Image (tube, rainbow, N blue to C red):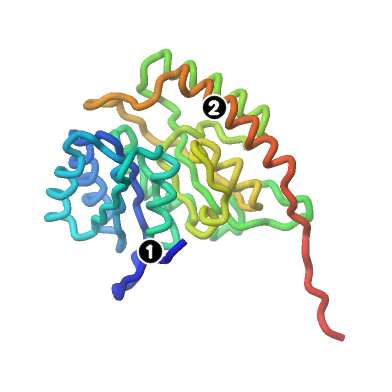
């Protein structure tokens, strides 16, 4: 894993967006992100073009002319959303990462809310009322968007509700909506996670497995206006079942002893 080389000061926030065949949605989404973040802080946007076969690459080239914050990575072949997230976060220069889906359904106006929630958790010293097995509070590693009012088709909402219920029962991650693409994650915490296809759906459980804290914040959700979903309900269900079993096994086999250094006499 290589750290990005740059002589410029590191930004305070990296926005990572995986895209595959999103030529019609990526331009307006990037414009919204820039409008929200430019008045607030120094940032970069990293878009990972995951082997798109439409005009996504050309649209990104056009956007970069007006957006010096934009960096573009490209996978030669479609490798999946998790692989694209990993590529983007590997290349990111900020300590904290915001992730969004490239279809425009996540609202960039919610990014400041995630940042404010993280800051409140840091200032108060904890993200919620729980402690570790050893009575110590741990640092927050992830703030998740929670789509309370989803604007997807009814079949997709039902499938997601069932999947979330099964996942919570098996993994005890207490997250109401792991499928929301809008998340704020500490880069160092992400880099320590095991990597596998579809890992992005289990970030709350994986972050907690690593001993970090998570927080869920209500965010907006918008209907898809252009393009089409890359996942079907049955595809999600079958793949998710095998992933869920694997993640549950991984959590049960985790070793995380409490270590204290003995001071010299």
Query: Furthest-top residue in view?
Result: 155
Numbered badge on residue 240: 2
The quadrant holding residue 53 is top left
Q: Number of callouts in the render?
A: 2
Q: Quadrant of residue 253?
A: top right
Tell me the element at label 2.
Answer: helix
Residue 75 x %, y %? 32, 46
Q: Residues within 10 Å of mark 1 (few under 14, many from 20)?
A: many
| Residue 95 spot, x, y in % from top left | 44, 62
Above or below for 162 versus 242: above
Vertical position of residue 37 compared to residue 231: above or below: below
| Marks 2 and 1, the one that precedes in the sequence | 1
In this view, the residue in front, 243 or 168, is 243
Q: Which residue of the protein is positioned furthest toward the front in this rendering?
A: 76
* In the displayed structure image, the side of residue 103 where residue 168 appears, left or right: right
Residue carrying label 1: 93
Query: Between 91 and 117, which is closer to the camera in this rendering?
Result: 91
Q: CA distance from mark 2 to mark 1?
A: 31 Å
Q: Tag 2: Cα neighbours inside 10 Å, few (<14), some, or many (≥20)?
A: some
**SS at mark 1 in the image:** loop
Tell me which residue sits at (35%, 22%) in the image: 151
What's the residue at 67%, 41% (across, down)? 250
Q: Position of residue 239 (x, y in %)?
A: 52, 26
Q: Quadrant of residue 124?
A: bottom right
Residue sitting at the far right? 265
Position in image of residue 155 (x %, y %): 42, 13
């Amino acid at each position: 894993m290589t750290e990005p080389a740059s002589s410029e000061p590191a930004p305070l926030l990296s926005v990572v967006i995986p895209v595959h065949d999103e030529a019609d949605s990526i331009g307006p989404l990037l414009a919204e992100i820039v409008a929200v973040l430019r008045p607030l802080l120094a940032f970069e946007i990293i878009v990972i073009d995951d082997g798109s076969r439409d005009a996504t690459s050309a649209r990104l080239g056009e956007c970069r002319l007006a957006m010096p914050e934009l960096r573009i990575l490209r996978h030669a072949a479609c490798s999946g959303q998790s692989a694209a997230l990993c590529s983007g976060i590997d290349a990111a220069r900020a300590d904290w990462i915001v992730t969004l889906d490239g279809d425009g359904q996540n609202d960039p106006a919610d990014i400041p809310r995630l940042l404010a929630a993280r800051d409140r958790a840091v200032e108060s010293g904890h993200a919620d009322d729980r402690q570790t097995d050893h009575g110590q509070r741990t640092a927050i590693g992830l703030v998740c968007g929670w789509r309370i009012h989803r604007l997807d088709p009814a079949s997709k909402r039902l499938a997601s509700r069932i999947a979330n219920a099964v996942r919570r029962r098996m993994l005890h991650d207490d997250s109401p909506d792991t499928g929301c693409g809008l998340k704020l994650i500490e880069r160092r915490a992400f880099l320590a996670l095991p990597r596998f296809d579809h890992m992005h759906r289990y970030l709350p459980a994986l972050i907690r497995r690593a001993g970090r804290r998570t927080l869920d914040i209500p965010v907006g959700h918008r209907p898809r206006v252009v393009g089409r979903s890359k996942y079907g309900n049955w595809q999600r269900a079958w793949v998710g079942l095998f992933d869920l079993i694997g993640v549950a096994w991984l959590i049960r086999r985790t070793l995380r002893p409490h270590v204290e250094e003995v001071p010299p006499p």
